[in-house]
Image (tube, rainbow, N blue to C red):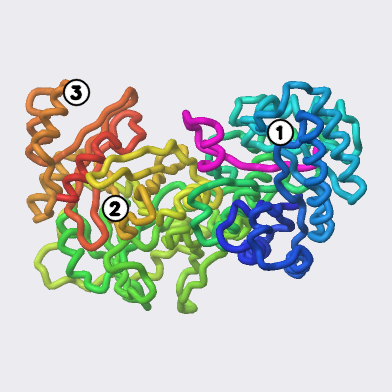
Amino acid sequence: MRTSIATVSLSGTLTEKLTAAARAGFDGVEIFENDLIGSPLTPEEIRDRAADLGLTIDLYQPMRDIEAVPEAEFARNLRRAAHKFRLMRRLGADTVLVCSSVSPHAVDDDALAAGQLRRLAALAQESGVRVAYEALAWGRHVSTYDHAWRIVEAADHPALGVCLDSFHILARGSDPTGIEAIPGERIFFLQLADAPLMALDVLQWSRHYRCFPGQGDLDVAGLVRAAVRAGYDGPLSLEVFNDVFRQAEAGRTAVDAQRSLALLQESAGLTAPPAPVVPTGFAFAEIATADTARITPLLSALGFSRTARHSGKPVDLWEQGEARILLNTDTSGHRPDLSLTAVGLETPAPEAASARAESLLAPVLPRRRAPEDAPLDAVAAPDGTEFFFCATGRRGHSDWTGDFAPAPQAPTPQAPAGIGITRIDHVALTQPWHQFDEAVLFHRSVLGLHPHASVDLADPYGLLRSRAASNAEGTVRIALGVGASPTDDPARPQHIALATDDLVAAVRGARAAGARLLPVPANYYDDLAACHTFAPGELETYRELGILYDRDEKGEFRHCYTLTTGRLFFELVERTGGYDGYGARNAPVRLAAQRA
């Protein structure tokens, strides 16, 4: 289906918004009245600019407080509407959005509303314009789509139809299946937005917290399916009021918006792009640093051994169990020194994963490689982290480990002994403030991971927001974090969590080898004693070693942290039973200890 976006969903001038929408691949736009009023361009120039960019102007919006008012006021509304209809002809738009009235002068009289909307539609028809009547969720007397349709049906004019807005419908808990009873030709427009579930006044919820489909909790795909079954064949248009989007760069927001519509159409069964390829595990985590001396002592103390070096690049491979760390000293173009810059994902079908990424506007990154190097595709996440699609040691697929030769023997007399690390449990990536929702959608749509509920974490200097995404088995977990405001430090630490089956033994081994672990306040363990019952000596061991503890109805979680080096620290974790979280209750203690 055709795609469209309301200019209110993007930041910048009207010209910048049109350019961003066109470059992202949209077919059309909704022109928001404030954008036109504030533009130095004439309506004719805006129409021509849109046409030059390959965009149609699908909707002009909004007209407010029109219907069910005293006759004298309605006469003034018709005069205002006549002016707008002439403007629309100059603009090249043939459909106008009319919102259900919130005016204190509006009366609860459906017959009056239908009669006045019929007169409005007749006037619109003279200018070649259609009127799409939308029920605002906070409308004074009309607040549901079925009520709006009853009024439109009673008005019985060919130039009058309904506009269905997914937020207004789903935020009120209305059943969208009733849309199927509306004739498709009377559904003039379909506006789409998602939102996180929040206990908030619906007007404030709508004005500040809408997001693109797939970034929130509403069943937007189900509503689209109902509209298509009714016979709707117009554009899928995004109308998103969001404080973050209004401040973010318009170009990447438009790409994110287009990606959301691609996922939405797939979820609604309207398109069949390359299927998601869900990763099965971590192949490696890559750390960029100009000086390996800052990190190699810690890796050694954590039981990792330097086993191989890339045949043509300054990259070393460190291994323990199935956990692999790459140290890359080519830091040109990378983020701050000593940071996590790339993640290798074990992927059942790397080529299919790449095709999926490209179909969702995440083009495969160019990669410098020698002719003998294994082909290895990668895509960039919104924060710049590169994700590689790997098939380590699998017959019939290129194996990236073949590019590495065994490392020469180090002059030290003995390689470090392992401490029981088995694999990478999860990675935590700090996101730029403007890109958090974009990152959630990327990990869901491109990588095929399932996003979990958003969690607020208390830092001594504010709240941090965290949202994890994982595969069903929990063998790939990625925690996304963001600060409370745009001024929050964008270089907050990232971390790599390493799994072990015996955390106590692993910590003792790491400490004996010289690892410096994050100290935990004694008050934490006093509180822990009040919350849980432990076996004799268990809590004392945790206190001695700086181990944090959590449990839920499924299992237990033990974890501890190294001190931060550069922009990176490590976490050691032990999961028992079916524990599926990340120790969120302990995050404030960890954050305070790191600040200290």
Figure check: 456 above or below 570: above
- The label shown at residue 154 is none
Q: Is residue 122 left or right of residue 203?
A: right
Q: Is residue 230 left or right of residue 283?
A: right
Q: Residue furthest front?
A: 72
Q: CA distance from mark 3 to mark 1?
A: 52 Å
Q: Which residues are magenta?
A: 187-209
Q: CA distance from mark 2 to mark 3?
A: 28 Å
- Residue 5 in sight in this render: no
**Amino acid under label 3?**
Cys
Q: Nearer the viewer, mark 1 or mark 2?
A: 1
Q: Earlier in the sequence, mark 1 or mark 2?
A: 1
Q: Position of residue 394 (x, y in %)?
A: 47, 56
State the residue position of label 1.
100
> In the image shown, does 240 or 520 lie closer to the viewer?
240
Q: CA distance from mark 1 to mark 2?
A: 50 Å
Q: Position of residue 496 (x, y in %)?
A: 30, 52
State the residue position of label 3.
531
Could you tell me which residue is drawn at 73 percent across and 21 percent down? 108
Q: Secondary structure at mark 1?
A: loop
**Amino acid under label 2?**
His
Q: Position of residue 374 (x, y in %)?
A: 47, 69
Residue 204, magenta (yes or no) = yes
- The label shown at residue 495 is 2
Q: Rate crowding at label 2 as few (under 14), some (14 to 19) or many (20 or more) other CA atoms within 10 Å.
A: many
